[in-house]
Image (cartoon, rainbow, N blue to C red):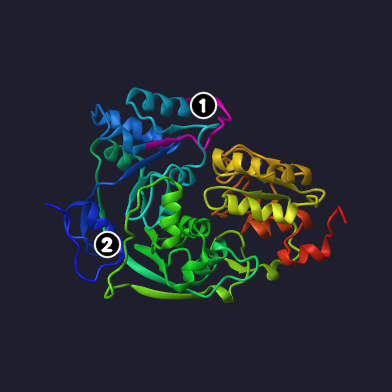
Amino acid sequence: MRGKAVTGCTITQKILAAHAVGGTAEAGQIVTIRPDVVLLNDVSGPLAFEQFDAMGATAPFDPERIVLVADHFAPAPDVTAAGAIAMTRGFAARHGIRHFYEPGRGGIEHTLLAELGMVGHGGIVFGADSHTCTAGAFNALGIGFGSTDLAAALAMGQLWMRVPESIRVELSGVPGAYVTGKDVILELIRRIGSDGAADAALEFGGPGLAALPVDARMAIANMAVEAGADTCVFEGDALSAADMAARGMAPVAAVAADAGATYRAGIAIDLGALQPMVARPPSPASGVPVTALRGQRVDQVYVGNCSNGTMTDLRQVAEILRGRQVAPGVRMIVVPATQKIWRQALAEGLLEVFAAAGAAVSTPTCGACFGGHMGILAAGETAIATTNRNYRGRMGHPESQVFLANAWVAAAAAVAGEIVPPDEIATRFALEAA
């Protein structure tokens, strides 16, 4: 039996109904879903491959709809990581999975998946990574599962799940200077807490959406899980349609909620009232305006990851760093999210700006974000990062601390050696060329 939607549906319910093989896509009900893409990385993948073999599976459901990305421990920092990547590479070769990506060809999985043109209006991605919800930026659903669940999805091309309730986030206004998607999601999590969207999907829309480019939407969608959400989705519009076209995807009508859709709650955010935000450790929910943390010393500045490693973020960093220097005693690491973004940044001269300022530029990797490699913090050190989590020990030693912010704020801290509002850089730190 094909899946059914009920009347008065949210975007989430409609997308699930379109992918269901049975059941009714009503909040609280169980449905079996066929995803468009199954996404695994070098940490979650090997666990899923072992379970795939243990269940007696001999072939994946559709090699063309499976994407394997080496991004967490890539480039491999030790023999254990090298073995996990080799196992992932071997699974791809053994089963004819052409969408296998590692350093030099790929990037961070959630950004890469969009770049490949594999997620767009009305799609569903199943991934064994909590930030699979990044797909929501494209009027799609990205849903995270455990590796054992994904082993079943690899074999059968379907999984059961509970249909979540939805929370409507109505956006209005236009962001002011130095305000980005990062600030929108940090403000939302500040309001509702790290479990405020538990057992729900966040649905973003409203007239303010037109003022948020797709890169900003990705930053918001990426951190929906930090509010406890099962998934999230943005309304589709002309910007998302243009983005699909630019990525070579065929035009597909956006999925919209019914006029009488039922929501668990509604939240209004005026983009014009926001300031650049910084989330204090140990939680993304501990956000305050950047002005409240003026003078907070930093040892490391990290720009990158699946939340904020886009060309938009790199251009913002370059705007602050151009003609200036990273402060003495501060190390700055810039990580473009994919190889394509890295090359575009090279072509635009941004990598030279970063290098001239004294920043280190990395190949695309998740490494430092989760405390794996390529930027670990020592005891007593403080970082400001554009990443998505800042709990105790997230980027290294348990006695280190991480502040979360947008790329402009992070770059300003690199120049000042402390957290400062980005608009103060021009007056406090004159251009070296001047």
Residue tagged 1: 82
Name the mark nearer the viewer: 2 or 1. 2
Is 314 positioned to the left or the right of 269 in the image? right
Q: Is residue 375 visible?
A: no
Residue 207: name its quadrant.
bottom left
Q: Residue 240: image x %, image y %?
A: 43, 58
Q: Is residue 394 above or below residue 154?
A: below
Whether 315 is drawn above or below 347: the answer is below
Q: What amino acid does circle 2 point to?
A: Gln
- Disc 2 to disc 1, C-alpha distance: 41 Å
* Above or below 46: residue 268: below
User: Callout 2: 10 Å neighbours few (<14), some, many (20+)?
Assistant: many
Is residue 242 visible in the rendered image? The answer is yes
Name the residue beneath numbered marker 2: 13
Pick the residue in front: 241 or 216: 241
Q: Which region is colored magenta? A: 67-83
Question: Callout 2: helix, strand or loop?
Answer: helix
Magenta residue check for 218: no
Left/right placement of residue 113 relative to residue 407 reads left
Which quadrant of the structure image shows residue 63? top left
Task: Give the image quarter of residue 351.
Answer: top right
Asked whether, in this view, residue 270 is left or right of residue 143, the answer is right
Q: Are marks 2 and 1 in contact (CB under 8 Å)?
A: no
Q: Secondary structure at mark 1?
A: helix
Q: Position of residue 318 (x, y in %)?
A: 70, 52
Quadrant of the drawing holding the C terminus? bottom right
Q: Residue furthest left?
A: 1
Amino acid type of the residue that numbered disc 1 sits on in the rendered structure:
Ala
Q: How many marks?
A: 2
Most foreground residue, 346 or 227: 346
